[in-house]
Amino acid sequence: MGSTTPDAGDQSRLRQLNERAVLAAVRSAGDVRVAQIVEQSGLGRTAVEEVLASLLTRRWLVEESPAIRGRGRPARSYRFRAEAGYVVGLDIGAFSVRGVLTDLNGQTLASQRQSVTPETPRPERLAAADEVVAACAREAGAEVWAVGVGTTGLVDAAGTVVRANAIPDWAGTDLAEYFGRSAPLVVVDNDSQLAALAEQRRGATDMVFLHAGRRTGLALVLDGQLRRGAYGAAADMSALRGVAWEVALEHLHAVVPAEIPEMDKAERAFAAARDGDRAAVNAVRKYARAMAVAAATAISIVDPRLLVLGGAFSQSADVLMEPLAAELDRLCPRVPELRASSLGALCVALGAASLALDAVDGRLLARSRGPLPTLAATSLDSPKR
C-alpha cells in the first residue's frame, strides 16, 4: 500500500493556504485576538500560532500592545499591516487629472489634482498624470506598489484607449504600457466603470450608475458585481443619437455669462438654480431630461433596485435630483430608489485605487500564489524571500 503521509510539497501548500486564511481573517476584522482568528479561520490554535509568528517575522502583521486590565497576562491582538504598501488611483479626464493614494486597506492618505484641457497634447496630459502620482507619493511619504488608471473613453482589456470622444488625440494611448515603465503593477479601465466600482465597494449591490459631469456615462452593478460586458462597453450609450449627451451641457452653459471658464459654467448654472433663477432652473430641467433618456433605457433593461447619481455633478443633487426623478417617472414603468453619491469628483480615482488594490491582492494574496514574501521594503517586485 502507498504511504498516506503528506509529502513536503503538500505540507508547503498547506502552510501557504493557512497563511492566507489567517491573513484574511486579521485583515477583515481589524484589531483581532488569537481566539477570534481561530474562530474565523477555521484552523486549530497551534496552527494559528505558528502562522502568526511567521507573518509577524515577514512583516505582514503587527502585534498590538494590549491594554492591561486586572491580573494575568493580557490577550495578544494583531492587525494587518496596511501601511506595508500603497496604491494610486488616477482619473485622467478632458479637464483634469486627479489622483488618490491609499494604503492596502483602501484608506485615503493623499490626493492631488492637475488642470488640463481637451486640447492638451497627449505627452503633456501623461506628464500631468506622472506629476499627480509623484505628488501623491511625496505627500504620503510612500512608495507606490500599483497604479490604477481610469480614463474617459472605451478601454480594451490590454489597457489601451480604443475610443475617446472628449480628447482629440487620446484614442490609441496604451496606458498600461506607459505607466508600466515606472509602476510595478498597472490596471486600466473606463472612468464610469470605475466610479461605479467605488460605489460597489461602499455597499451598492444592484444599481445603474449615472456618471454626471462634464462628461457623462453609465455603468452597471448587478448581483454585487461590476458588469463590464464582453468588450468593456456595457451601458455605453454615448454613440446613440437619441441620447443627446454631447449637447446636454449646452443647456447649462447658455444661462451663465460667456466669460466664465467652460469648466466652471455648469457649477455656476447649478448655483443660480439653487438661488431660484428661473432660466437656470429651466436649464437644469432640460439637462435632467437629456440624462434621463439613457438612464431610463438602462433601468428598463436591467430593472435595478437603485440608481446612483455620481460624478462631479452629484454635488448639486439638491437641484438636479428632483427634475431627474420627474423625468424618470415619466419614462419608466418602475423607478428604482434614487440616491446621490457622496464621493463627488473623486469617484473615478477612488474606483481606480480599488482596482489597483484588487490587482495587488491577486499578485500577492491569491490562494494560487506561492509563499507570501517578506516585506522588508515597500516593493512589489523585489521582496525578500
Image: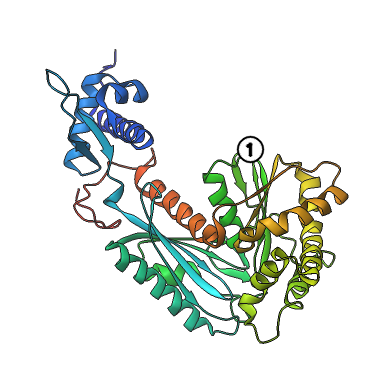
Q: Quadrant of residue 168?
A: bottom right
In the rendering, at what x and y percent does residue 44 appear? 27, 19
In the rendering, at what x and y percent does residue 68 appear? 15, 27
Toward the bottom, the furthest residue is 259
In the rendering, at what x and y percent does residue 349 appear? 49, 61
Q: SS of the residue at dot 1?
A: loop
Residue bearing the label numbered 1 = 223
Q: Residue 90: tell me if it is visible.
A: yes
Between 78 and 236, the one lying in front of the other is 78
Toward the top, the furthest residue is 1
The vertical placement of 252 against 101, above or below, is below
Locate the N terminus and report the quarter of the image it occupies: top left
The vertical placement of 69 against 132, above or below, is above
In the rendering, at what x and y percent does residue 263 appear? 61, 77
Disc 1 residue crowd, few under 14, some 14–19, many 20+, Cα 10 Å:
few
Between 15 and 203, the one lying in front of the other is 203
Between 225 and 141, the one lying in front of the other is 141
Relative side of 212 to 55, left or right: right
Residue lying at 57% horizontally and 56% vertically, measured from the top left: 195
Q: Residue 182: tell me if it is visible.
A: no
Q: Which amino acid does label 1 sit on?
A: Asp
